Image (tube, helix red, strand yellow):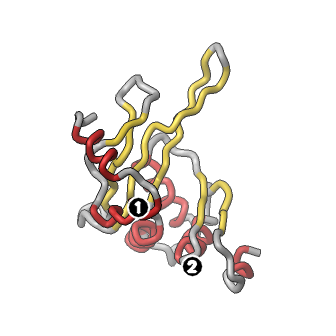
């Protein structure tokens, strides 16, 4: 069904939880240019990239590590990590880190840049110095770029 959807004029494509070789369908959805969203379980933004690379390689020998890293770095723009802890009050969730991903560092094959994060032990997310200039265009859509820069310069996590 996902492959059939590529022919339609969709504004978004959503691939549910990625746990294995379906990551290739997620990458195709992301490469379609319509915008997409997907979820997976990992301990951090960095672990998310590593997990998705491993998932892609499960699809078979035709998916190499280099291909998986390159495809992810070219297809994923933003990773939002939601942390969860079980307490006496029940399960609590909060956004603990937001990173942008792109091609980069030769050794890893990608660049992962934190743009929002929580200090250790905190559940309050705040801007951290790191928003690449290519995201300055977000101001056209209401993102407070000046506020982000001021908060990120107030202190580094």
Please name whichever residue, 90 or 42, is drawn nearer the observer in this view of the structure.
90
Q: Which mark is on residue 80?
A: none
Say which residue appears at 77% left-offset and 75% top-offset.
1
Q: Residues within 10 Å of mark 1 (few under 14, many from 20)?
A: few
Crowd tier of the residue under label 2, counting other residues whose Cα lies within 10 Å: few below 14, some 14–19, many 20 or above: some
Q: Position of residue 85 (x, y in %)?
A: 57, 26
- Mark 2, residue position: 32
* Snapshot quadrant of residue 18: bottom right
Q: Which is nearer the eye, 81 or 61?
A: 81
The C terminus is located in which quarter?
top left
Quick one: SS at disc 1?
helix
Residue name at image x 39 percent, y 60 percent: 139
Residue 38 in picture, x, y percent from top left: 60, 58
Of circles 2 and 1, the one toward us is 1
Give the image location of residue 127, x and y in percent: 34, 42
Q: Which element carries disc 2, helix, strand or loop?
A: loop
Tell me if residue 49 comes above or below residue 82 in the rendering: below
Q: Which of the pair 157/21 is nearer the observer?
A: 157
State the image coordinates of residue 50 (x, y, percent, origin top left).
Answer: 44, 54
Asked where in the image residue 154 lies, by quadrant, the reply is top left
Q: Nearer the viewer, residue 92 or 47?
A: 92
Mark 2 vs mark 1: which is more N-terminal?
2
State whether residue 141 is above or below residue 1.
above
Count numbered badges in the picture.
Answer: 2
Name the residue: 27% across, 47% down: 149
Residue named by callout 1? 138
């Amino acid at each position: 069904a996902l492959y059939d959807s590529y022919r339609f004029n969709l504004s978004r494509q959503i691939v549910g939880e990625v746990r294995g070789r379906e990551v290739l369908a997620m990458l195709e959805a992301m490469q379609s240019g319509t915008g997409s969203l997907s979820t997976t379980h990992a301990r951090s933004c960095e672990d998310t990239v590593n997990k998705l690379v491993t998932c892609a390689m499960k699809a078979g020998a035709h998916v190499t590590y280099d291909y998986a890293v390159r495809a992810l770095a070219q297809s994923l723009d933003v990773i939002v990590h939601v942390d969860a802890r079980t307490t006496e009050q029940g399960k609590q969730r909060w956004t603990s880190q937001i990173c942008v991903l792109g091609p980069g560092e030769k050794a890893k094959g990608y660049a992962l840049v934190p743009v929002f994060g929580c200090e250790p032990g905190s559940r309050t997310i705040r801007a951290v110095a790191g928003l690449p200039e290519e995201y300055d265009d977000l101001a056209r859509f209401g993102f407070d770029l000046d506020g982000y820069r001021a908060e990120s310069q107030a202190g580094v996590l």
